[in-house]
Image (tube, grey):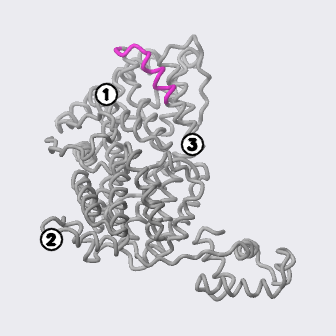
Amino acid sequence: MKVPSRPPPLRPALARPQIPLPLGTAHAEHDALRTTASGASTRVFAALAEEDWDRAAEIAVTTWGPLVSFHPDVLSVVCESAPADRLATHPEWIVLRSYLRQLLTRPDLRPVLYTDDAPAPASAHGPMTRAMLVLSRVLAARTEGDYERAATLATEAERLARGADPDHPATVALMVPLLLQCAFAHEFAPHPEPAARLLGEVFRRAEAAGDLRGAIAAAGELGWLLALTGDGATADDWLDTHETLRDSARTVHARVVSGRMGRALRHGDGLDLTAAQAVLDETDPDEAGEHRLLLTGLGVLVGARGADDLGGALLSRFDSQVMGIPLGGRSQGLNARFSTVIRSEVLALRGDAAAALRAYDGIELRRDPVVAARLAGIHLLLEDEDAADALARETIESAGFWPRAHTESVLIRAAVALRRGDRERAADLFREGLAATAANRSSMPLAYLPMDDLGRLAELLPPAERPAGLDVLLAGRIALLPSGQRSVRPTPGELRLLRALAVDTDEQRLAATLGVSRNTVRTQLHTLYRKFGVNSRAALRAAARREGLL
């Protein structure tokens, strides 16, 4: 396929790994690989019929790519029929057995099914065997939601695999699944740089090994990851490749959910929420597996920008679906960060900037430029220009692999400069931000400015300099952050009362618990009703939970 030309990066200082632009695979290769897989299947079963497991294993390894793409069940048969003495001397087959069991299981059950029953790596094992045994621990850690440990183990598995003979058939065959699973571990940690590097390598290796399944998965995952970071131009190249391969290999049951999430996100970046929602509607959540929270959250973000209720019902539905995900899978790493960003954005869209700010309590900013950029935007909503500018400036310097965070931060600094009366500085920064949105083919960063600030910045430019995306936003076709934000800030005493109200009890017991008079409890309760705009304890508790206070 033809790779579209890309504009140079706006700021060369942004550190990005060297990812090769994908070239794709010819449609004609699909039939040839399927023929190879069918022939290999016949030979595997013939060897097993003669009780020659070693021969069957050799065929499986040398034709791993075509077999895993078209007949993964045949590989599973080889693993399941391995004699005990062979498993003792070649324990990598134990890992492959568990891996294929998971691969052939319903996607909605995969996150909770991986069984790490492989032995510990030993010095007697070769580098690739040790790498596979460590990979088993990687998969188990991801199952438990311990993404940091999974990423650390993935680094070790990769190091060991690099020490194997690169021309050995087992190395050629197993590097694709090994590096792909290591990339997932880094992605969910979240460590996007090593994840992207590994996915690019997986794609190249998969193409060379005839592993269409691996090539489709790597291209889609990399397209999604780059779309998430905001590198829209490169994301589009990978998503195009993913879709070309997917459409030319319909009989290959490959991972496609990530590619669809990436495409939906790219439609959203182009402000086409209808197209984004259409892609999400075509995506089965039960196929998402480990990506289920990300898929559900993306639906909330798309819906909240276009819905009349600004995400209230969507957020409730999100909460109910998230509770069905094992705690470890939703409380750490990328899932936890993404969930926080979603809640904060919906609250800000509804005018609850104070609650949006509290949603980020406990998040370590140094590790997440997007969180830092979004926090800067919330401080801007709360009219704390000094905090907004400081956070935005720090994020620009540390955005690294996150051009989305860099662009949003430049735009926030433009708004701060204009509020301070520096129109020339504001215009320069706004033009820089607009140039970044053009380079990354993404208008959505503009939607993270408060509505009034965006309008005033647009007035600094002549109509000829305003991009189409800016006009779409100013026309009100996408929900923007309201400039007038409601700020609910209970006093320390009111906050103690709120927490005591988590358990329903009468005013006399509340007074005794808090060490105050009954009249004080009654006064504070009515003040809280007024602040939250409610008229009952049940409604107050619900509102306090939405604000992140309970």
Q: Residue at x 41, y 60 (%)?
A: 298
| Dot 3 amino acid type | Thr
- Element assignment for label 3: helix
Estimate the x, y position of residue 483 in percent, counting from the top left: 40, 76
Specify the segment rendered in magenta. 155-167
| Dot 2 amino acid type | Pro
Closer to the camera in the image, 375 or 55: 375
The residue labelled by disc 2 is 463
- Element assignment for label 1: helix
Q: Nearer the viewer, mark 3 or mark 2?
A: 2
State which tag comes first along the sequence, 3 or 2: 3
Q: Residue at x 34, y 32 (%)?
A: 202
Q: Quadrant of residue 438?
A: bottom left
| Dot 1 amino acid type | Arg
State which tag comes first along the sequence, 1 or 3: 3
Confirm whether the magenta stretch covers residue 162.
Answer: yes
Q: Quadrant of residue 88?
A: top right
Q: Is residue 213 above or below residue 525?
A: above
The residue labelled by disc 3 is 143
How packed is label 3: few (under 14 Cα within 10 Å), some, or many (20 or more)? Answer: many
Estimate the x, y position of residue 230 in percent, counting from the top left: 33, 51
Confirm whether the magenta stretch covers residue 324.
Answer: no
For the C terminus, which image quadrant? Answer: bottom right
The residue labelled by disc 1 is 205
Q: Nearer the viewer, mark 1 or mark 2?
A: 2
Q: Work out how far the residue at label 3 is from the one at label 2, CA to CA, in angstroms.
A: 53 Å
Q: Quadrant of residue 200?
A: top left
Please indicate, yes or no, whether residue 543 appears anywhere in the rendered image. yes
Please indicate, yes or no, whether residue 247 appears anywhere in the rendered image. no
- Element assignment for label 2: helix
Closer to the camera in the image, 116 or 93: 116
Q: Work out how far the residue at label 1 is from the one at label 3, CA to CA, in angstroms.
A: 26 Å
